[in-house]
Image (tube, rainbow, N blue to C red):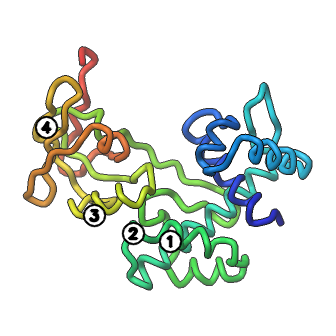
Amino acid sequence: MPSQTLEEYLEAIYKLAEHGEARPSRLAEAMGVAAPTVTSTLKRLKTRGLITRPGGAIALTPTGRSEALNIIRRHRLAERFLVDVLGMAWEDVHEEACRLEHALSPKVQAALETYLENPDVCPHGHPIPSAEGAVAEVTGDPLCGFDTGADVQIIRIEEEDERLLSYLASLGMYPGTRVKVCDVAPFHGPLMVEIGGSRYALGRDVAAKIVVGASTARAVAKKSARR
């Protein structure tokens, strides 16, 4: 089993690859470390057969991907436990789960999953990998890509930044929440959205981090090509 540091690198590489190509500069930013530290750690990961370096990028080997999904599974189960059982606020659990994830054995993971009644997603809406490494594909689009009249439902929050999550919580914007787009200001202005009968102005940067899908209430109005 990789060390705690190597596990965190594998997790970060997997997440970077989900949103594009994983490269050392992006990894250094994600980990909050200097470039030489990343270079040294990547050498250790490659020596252990956990990554390859195609064209200077970083790619997980099958073993590396399996290890990454295992740590992500532990992290997201820990987050569910902290929110669902201990009643912690969703903006407070990411860092705590980072500490817990390294201590969960396969036996504890299985027991925790059973106790939590086999949750599909973490509190922020990200899928929880199965014990076999399968990851459910949950499709959706950023809220900023919808036009006036769209009636959608929040699927997940792309970033687990504490300030962002605290802000969204103050608006009642959690996965599963229905959101209606009432107006979209021109020139990259904010979206006016309705949530639970109240209206809020939502900046485009924030709306870009909220992934939504069609509400069961009505069809979604996507932005037209001319925009």
- Outermost residue toward the right? 47
**SS type, badge 2:** helix
Sooner in the amino-acid sequence: mark 3 or mark 2:
2
Q: Identify the secondary structure beneath mark 3.
A: helix
On screen, residue 188 versus residue 25, left or right, reads: left
Badges 3 and 2: C-beta atoms under 8 Å apart? yes
Report which residue position mark 2 lands on.
90
Query: Tag 4: residue type?
Result: Gly
Real-space Cα separation, disc 1 to disc 4, in angstroms: 34 Å
The reply to whether callout 1 and callout 2 are in contact (CB within 8 Å) is: yes
In this picture, residue 185 sits left or right of residue 46: left
Query: In the rendered image, which residue does mark 3 sit on?
Result: 169
Q: Amino acid at mark 1?
A: Glu
Dot 4: what SS?
loop
Mark nearer the viewer, 1 or 4: 1
- Kindly check if marks 3 and 4 are in contact, taking CB atoms under 8 A apart as contact: no
Using the image as rendered, state which of residue 70 and residue 204 is in the foreground: 204
Question: In the rendered structure, are the residues bearing label 1 and label 4 in contact, judged by CB atoms less than 8 Å apart?
Answer: no
